[in-house]
Amino acid sequence: MYGDVVRTGPAEVTVFMPEAHEAVGGRRSECIKSEFYDLLWPEKALFAARDKGVHAKRRKVWQYGFSPSAIETHERKTLKWIDELDKQIERKAKSGTVVNATDFFLWFTFDIMGDFTFRVKLLPRVLWVKDWYESVEWCQEQMLERLSKGSQLGAPDLASFFMEKSESSKTDPWLKCDSLLAILAGSEPTAQILTAIFHELSIHPKHIEKIHQELAGVCITDNNELAGLPHLNAVIQEAMRLHPNLLTGGSRKTTEKGVKIGDVYIPPHITVITPHYTIARREDCFEEATQFIPERWSTRPEMVVNSAAHVPFSVAPGMADYEIYNSEGYPEV
C-alpha cells in the first residue's frame, strides 16, 4: 500500500483523500490550474483560464448564458431532441436491431448542444472532424457563420448571449474555443452520465419499476418536479458516483503557500491530482462502495460515511456542465 498521497511525477502527487477536492479545487482554495490547461495556448477559453481573475471575469459572460430564462429556453429545445431520440430507439427496437446506446446518447447530446450553442444540427457534419486542431477550427467556422446571422433568430442561443457581452464579437478571441467548450461540456459528459445510468438500470431492473411508480402523476417535462423524486435522484447520484465523468478531476497546482489536505502539507509549486473515480469508491467513505445501491442517497443514509468523497462534477464555482446536465439529463432519464 502506498497510502493516500502518492508521488506520480517529479513535481506531482496524486491524493486519494476526500478532503482534497475542496482543498485544491474549492471556492476558497488558493491553488491554480496546472500547466495542463495551457493546451489551448495561444487560444482562450473559460476552462483553460489559469488566472483566477481572468476566469472570474469570463465566467460572468457564461453565467449570463445560463441564467434561469436561458436555461428555460434550453429545456424547451431539449424536449424535441428527446422525442427524436425516443423515436430512434423505438424504431430500432421494433426492427430487432442491436444498437450501441453510448453512440445514441452522444449523437443526442451533440444535437442538443449544436442547437443550444449555434442553432445548427451538428451531425452528420461534425463526423468529418478528425483531430483536436480541426475541432477548434471547425468551431471557429461555426461561430463566425453564426455571428454573420446576428441575433434575430427567434429563441436565443448561447452564441447570442456571448455576442451581447463581447466588445467586438467577430474579433473576440474567446468565442472560438468557448464555443468548443460549450459543445464538449454539454455533450460528452452528459452522454457518459446517461450511459452510466442506463447501464446500471439494465443490470438492476428493479429500480426501473420504482422510478416508474415515482413518475405516476408527475409532469416529466418539469425539471423542478423531477428533481424532487427521491428514488430517481438516488439512482442518478449512485450511477455518477460509480462512473464519474471526471475520472481524475483535472489537476491543480499549489502556490507559494502550498496547501494542507487533512494532516498532509503539500509544498509550493506541486501539481495535485484528485482522482474522483478512486475516491468515490473508498470503503471508509461508503459502505459496500463498489456496489450499486441507490438507497444510500435516500432511505439508507447510514451507508454514506463521508459524502465529501462524491463530487460528480466539480467543486469549482460556476460549473456549466452541471447546469447543462440538469436541463438535458433529468428529462431523458
Image (cartoon, rainbow, N blue to C red):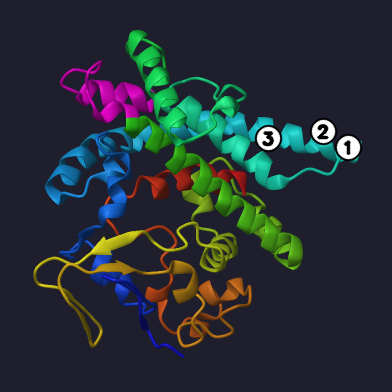
Residue drawn 74% across the image and 32% down it: 87
Could you tell me the amino acid type at mark 3?
Leu
Residue drawn 17% across the image and 67% down it: 269
> Magenta residues?
157-176
Decide which of tag 3 and tag 2 comes sooner along the chain: 3
- According to the picture, the residue beneath numbered tag 3 turns out to be 85
Q: Position of residue 327 (x, y in %)?
A: 47, 42
Distance between mark 3 and mark 2 Cα atoms: 10 Å
Could you tell me the amino acid type at mark 1?
Lys
SS at circle 3: helix
Q: Position of residue 90 (x, y in %)?
A: 80, 37
Quarter where residue 249 is shown: bottom left
- According to the picture, the residue beneath numbered tag 2 turns out to be 91
Quarter where residue 181 is shown: top left
**Closer to the camera, 15 or 131?**
131
**Whether residue 159 can be seen here:** yes
Residue drawn 28% across the image and 38% down it: 45
Residue closest to the far left: 256
Decide which of tag 1 and tag 3 comes sooner along the chain: 3
SS at circle 2: helix
169 drawn magenta: yes
Q: Position of residue 28 (x, y in %)?
A: 17, 65
- Total marks shown come to 3
Residue drawn 68% across the image and 35% down it: 85
Q: Residue 94 shows which numbered tag? A: 1
Residue closest to the far bottom: 1
